[in-house]
Amino acid sequence: MLHSQDIWVIARFEVVRHLRSRHAIAAGLLLILFCGFGAYELVQFADKLAELDRDLGPALDMIAGMVEGLTDLPVVGVRGLLRQHPPVLVALFALVMFLMPLLSIILAYDQTATDIETRHVRYLLFRSDRISIFLGKALGAQLIISIAVALVVLIFGVFLAVRTDALEGMKGVAYLGRIWVTAVLYAVPFVALLGLSSALFGRARRSLTVAFLYWFGVATLSGLLSLANEGFEHLRYLFPSVGRFDLLLDDPGDLRGTVLYLVAFTLVAGLLGLWRFRSRDL
Amino acid sequence: MTAALRVSGLSKSYGSLQALRGMNLEVQPSQIFGVVGPNGAGKTTLFSVISGFLPQDAGEVEIAGKRLSRGAPPPKGSLSILPQDAGFIADLNLGFQLVLYGELQGLGRARAQEEARRVLKLVGLSEVFDRKAKTLSHGMHKRVGIAQAFIGEPSLVILDEPTAGLDPHAAREIRALLRKIQGQRTVIVSSHNLGEVEDLCNEVAILDQGVLVRQDSITGVIGGAQLVVFRLSRPPAEADLAGLRALPFVTDVAWSTEDERLRVAFNADAQPPGPASRDMVCALVDAGVLFVEMKLGKSLEERFLEETRAGG
């Protein structure tokens, strides 16, 4: 039933379709502007660090404060990271992971929705099976996110390499690679969730709105209910933004729980999306 | 001979509305097969189930002897369809989209590109290969929709109202295209233009309220030569028809102001159709009434109205 060639053909089509769309071009330009501005700020930050010398207390305090502000990681963990890796890149890693839910929603909300809405999917359905179409669209979304994250990492990397010594040679380049791989893998549960939303609602705008409302709803509900009973805090696991900063840590033991949760979330959301896409009238 | 399409006991409901009620249909290969029925008869639902857009509630679909799983697509390259209401991606080049369809039918990229250009040429729209879908008129959109159905030369092509919304020139071109490929593959056409179905198809199925009410060759459906329909140069006076009424084999003579046709029913057992028609023509000419068209047998439209609730 499953046609791997079809999955690849559809994924490639989705990438080109997104790259050629006016929305994607506008979003790409905004992303480049944002990254340029962010990279400029980070370069300023790196310059200050260089003046202070990063082994000194004030430098570490400064960057640790920034990373702690963005993440929910323990102070000890952040300090450890800053000693192990180029501190500016740790800050960049935290920033990328902070933005990943938003970036993923924007880039992956319309997997099958427009195809269902315009019934373009009918030109595909008699040529391929529903599983291959669904997976091809999801792979396409995943590739688009990979390209966007690569762009972000590249812009920051080039700025830092040209303007500062913050990369610290190949060590920094390897760390940039790790940022990219981690962010791309972290996007997988989002692609699964947005695939479900897309198949469920069959309207692009509705899929996007519901994704944001769901994020906001889960955060609000878990926050408010946990005031009454701490057990309700677990509700936040209904949206995969939980534990994403754990992925900055080096020790695989610290990551195991988060990775298992993200894999389980991906499977549940992905299978629900696939079931909906397979069973609905198209 | 293995049927190009066989449908048995097909049922599909939308909530409480039963669109198909145990539909049975068999289409033999290499013919143009018409499917007609009033709105809501189940034509589009039937095509949607065959093509895998909708899973059926019950029943089976076989294409060229291969049974399809519920809601599954037909084997690659075996079936193609012009869906009634599908759209192309507005912001993308049509050529690019057609190449995708070719590749999904199992063609290599280069072959898919050749096919995309070939089918656009087939419908007389070679120039739109690099154009975005949103720049096309409704008629062009429809023709590209027809073009995509011929990518990869599938053995069974379903065209759901291929000429609906087209201007007379474009509709004529599409009919000419279908005549050109007649005999090369099986084409199933649905249309509300019954004259078009009568003109194009070898066989026709009449659907009503989700069931097949009649399936036969066009001549079989139209019903033998028990009726002669005249289109006259002017409305006849009652006296003009006296000669016709006097013929011993004529059973009824009726002038319809609705479509301005004279219908003469006769007993084919008493007088064979050929001599009967000759005698009727003589009777009209003797009365000084000229006719511009004569048709032996009932028109498909009349049979359609008789067979479906619209005629009741």
Image (cartoon, coloured by chain):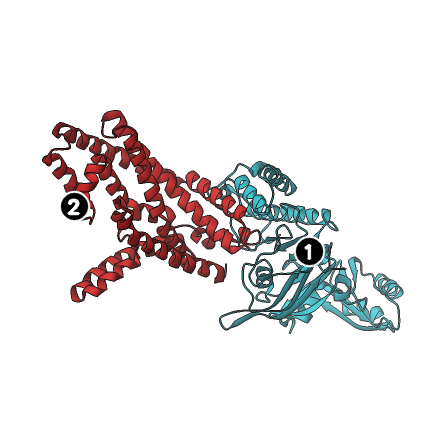
Chain colours: A red, B cyan
Residue A171 in the image: state x and y as whole percent. Answer: 28, 32
Give, as a three-letter code, the residue at label 1. Glu
Disc 1 element: helix
Rendering coords of residue A31 (x, y %): 31, 38
Q: Decide: few, some or many residues near mark 1? Use Cα within 10 Å; few <14, some 14-19, many ≥20.
A: some
Label at residue B66: none
In the image, is B306 to the left or to the right of A7? Answer: right
Spatial separation of the CA atoms under disc 2 and disc 1 = 80 Å
Whether residue A166 is visible to the viewer of this picture, yes or no, is yes
**Residues packed near mark 2 inside 10 Å, few (<14), some (14 to 19) or many (20 plus):** few
Is residue A178 depicted above or below A275 in this figure? Answer: above
Q: Nearer the viewer, residue A182 or B180?
A: A182
Examine the image and state in which quarter residue A60 appears.
top left
Screen quadrant of the N terminus of chain A: bottom right
- Which of the chains bears the disc numbered 2? A
Q: Is residue B257 visible?
A: no
Q: Please tell me how many numbered marks the rendered image carries.
A: 2
Question: What residue would you read off at disc 1?
Answer: B196
Given residues A196 and B309, the one toward you in this image is A196
x, y percentage for residue B292? 77, 56
Q: Which residue is mark 2?
A: A76
* Chain designation of label 1: B
Where does the image place residue B267, in percent across and percent down from the top left? Answer: 84, 73
Residue B144 falls left or right of residue A63: right
Given residues B187 and B312, the one toward you in this image is: B187
Which amino acid is tagged 2? Val
Residue at 33%, 39% (x, y): give it: A180
